[in-house]
Amino acid sequence: MAATTHTVSNQAPLLTAYDVYGSDRVLSEGVERHLAGAEPGLAAQVRGELTDLGRAAGSRQAQDWGALANENPPKLRTHDRYGNRIDEVEFHPSWHRLLGHAVGAGLTDAWGRPAGHLRRAAGFFVWSQAESGHGCPVSMTHAAVPALRTDPVLAAEWEPRLTSHVYEEGLRPAGQKAGVLFGMGMTEKQGGSDVRANTTTAVALDASGEYLLTGHKWFCSAPMCDGFLVLAQAPGGLTCFLVPRVLPDGTRNVFAIQRLKDKLGNRSNASSEVEFDGTWARRVGEEGRGVRTIIEMVAATRLDCVIGSASLMRQALTQAAHHAEHRSAFGSPLIDQPLMRNVLADLALESEAATTLTLRLAAAYDAGTDQERAFLRLAVPVAKYWVTKRCTPMVAEALECLGGNGYVEESGMPRLLRESPLNSIWEGSGNVQALDVLRALQREPLALGAFLQEVGLARGADHRLDSAIKDLLTELADLEGIEARARRVVERMALVLQGSLLVRWAPPEVADAFCASRLGGDWGAAFGTLPHSLDLRSIVERARITG
């Protein structure tokens, strides 16, 4: 039998050694746009940071780290060889390398740097394309800062560690580490998203804010973090607490990890069930105001769900376009065939809308004005609902662009698909987001005013957008049955917001296609059903890898 029967050809080469940031026109143009009024030199500094991170994310080394971290999921060690309870989770070395690079790139440091949220959001978007699972502790560490700032003493102690660019693995007293990571524990078995139904109890030790907790947390991600913000019932009501894994004297806090979750995706990351039994904690904020204290952390992690989904969408689009560029069928490259071009253009529209919205939200955090805070109050749950919902169908369609090759693990597409539903579930699933939007509409009129003012900046530029805004106002004016219509209302809010941003900032062919399909109704029920008269070639060309 011959050793070689034929030469393999017509296969797309491995996409590696490319700049994830610089090759993404939408992302790089968006960052430059939001930095246009920044102090001299800042734009060049941020551009350099993101270029370095983009090259690292597109390297074969980072791609290998991501694959290995998922092929070797974390393992729970409840006891040591002598029977002592240790409650440790072992990770593959690649997990630590991914985390180390993320922390070193400043992805937990946004709150005190110029344009900190924009540069951090763009960096999180870029680095998550190497691997998504390790982003969980990165996100929660970043998001813990505003919650801790409700207690100036705790903030002074912990914020420098949380925003450090140094990653140190292993459980030791936080005071002995140059940098720490934080997690969060809110949901319980009986309550889920209804955190006010929590039954974990907190008993005060003295007047200094020290308590002992007894209870459980049904979902506690990244249990090897150095500290956690959790909710428990104190005498004054539901309260936020800081639970360190290791106490200042070096002893382990009571943090019994019962098991690790066997999840659909996000397999490199450990999600656990934990029990508290006389667990030492510090109160954060006032008793009875736990939800209000932790809500800023929740809002920040919700934005990271948007960033994470937009990142997954971009990586899926990148892989689909790369395959179509190098694979030929029926006599021509796939990317030049009209029907495939329609599919890729549709995917590109979805990705650009998600990316543009993501950067707008991050820039609003940096602005920090009352107007922008009011805008974020609605825009974050609206974006969290819609962008994370669009992620799974888009990734599935991108996988199909590779045909059978996309269904094979070696392509990396199945990992993206398994990851794609995650962000829609974490930090409040779709119904939770939709109901939160209704709550803001009913209780915070300034939020609606800020949202409509943002959308209205594009009024008059496209008749389909104008019509969609009018329809939205009609929906919002009719409160009858509003809860049952909440998803419909939030979807329309998201689409008019994305449409407004694209009409103002995207190339005309992109804005025209988005308004025709998403707002004008000239669209089918699946990707690849854009009107054939649109400039699809230019949209696809914009989405291709450059540089």
Image (cartoon, rainbow, N blue to C red):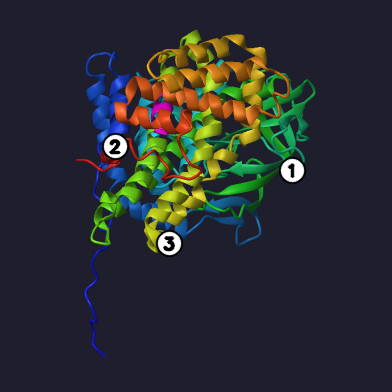
**In the drawing, what numbered circle is on residue 189?**
1
**Residue 355 lies in the magenta-colored region:** yes
The answer to whether the residue labelled 2 contacts the one labelled 1, judged by CB atoms less than 8 Å apart, is no
- Mark 3 or 2, nearer chain start: 2
Q: Looking at the rendered structure, which numbered label has been put on residue 409?
A: 3
Asked if residue 43 lies left or right of residue 523, the reply is: left
Distance from Cα at disc 3 to Cα at disc 1 = 33 Å
Left or right, residue 150 beside residue 3: right
Q: Quadrant of the C terminus?
A: top left
Q: Amino acid at mark 3?
A: Glu
Task: Residue 24: give its label.
Answer: 2
Label 2 vs 1, first from the N-terminus: 2
Provide residue 450's location: percent of width, then percent of height: 51, 12
Q: Nearer the viewer, residue 217 or 2?
A: 2
Residue 253 horizontal side relative to residue 411, left or right: right
Q: Residues within 10 Å of mark 2 (few under 14, many from 20)?
A: many
Q: Position of residue 177 (x, y in %)?
A: 45, 36
